[in-house]
Amino acid sequence: MASDAIFTTTLVNPATAAPFETIAQSSLEQVDDAIARAVTAQRSWAALAPAARAQALRDFATVVGGAVEELAVLEVVNSGHPITQARWEAGHVRDVLNYYAAAPERMLGSRSPSLAALTSPSLSRSASSGSSFRGTFR
């Protein structure tokens, strides 16, 4: 098998069995190159100050948040998930990015706006019991 041969995979919507995209498979050389670039990128990432990493994660979360519908539609076609579940998943990715962006602040004892939004307004002490909490995310 020649290393420059092009192999493809057809992606199929599991809900309809209809093909929706044909993609080229990566060669071993392309995979090796991607791994080498990832190693270099990780070193650059590790060299960033925690605040810069946090800002990069928040910027990524903003992009994901702006593309929730597009990401949800892709997930529906690719995996067959219901659209409401796919929207939740995309929103959850955004929320997880924001949560981990706040990790440096939590280590220092401060709170980011994203963490405060998840905890303060959404948790309320139950009137019937001083020790139980009811939590709902908005």
Image (cartoon, rainbow, N blue to C red):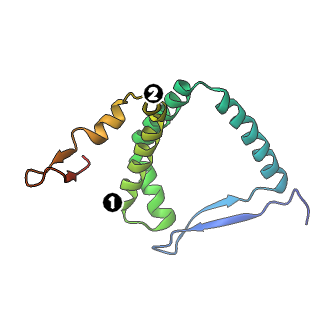
- Point out the image quarter for the N terminus: bottom right
Whether residue 111 is situated above or below residue 118 in the rendered picture: above
27 displayed left or right of 131: right
Say what amino acid the circle numbered 2 marks. Answer: Leu
**Where's residue 66, x and y in %?**
40, 39
Q: Residue at x 84, y 51 (%)?
A: 29
Locate residue 110 relative to residue 43 in the image: left or right.
left
Residue bearing the label numbered 2? 108
Determine whether, in the image, residue 15 is placed left or right of residue 84: right
Q: Are marks 2 and 1 in contact (CB under 8 Å)?
A: no
Where disc 1 sits, the SS reads helix
Residue lying farthest to the left in this orientation: 128
Disc ID at residue 84: 1
At 40% from the left and 44% from the top, the residue drawn is 95
Q: Is residue 39 above or below residue 82?
A: above
Q: Please name whichever residue, 78 or 119, is drawn nearer the observer in this view of the structure.
A: 119
Residue kind at label 1, given as amino acid type: Thr
Residue 67 in view here: no
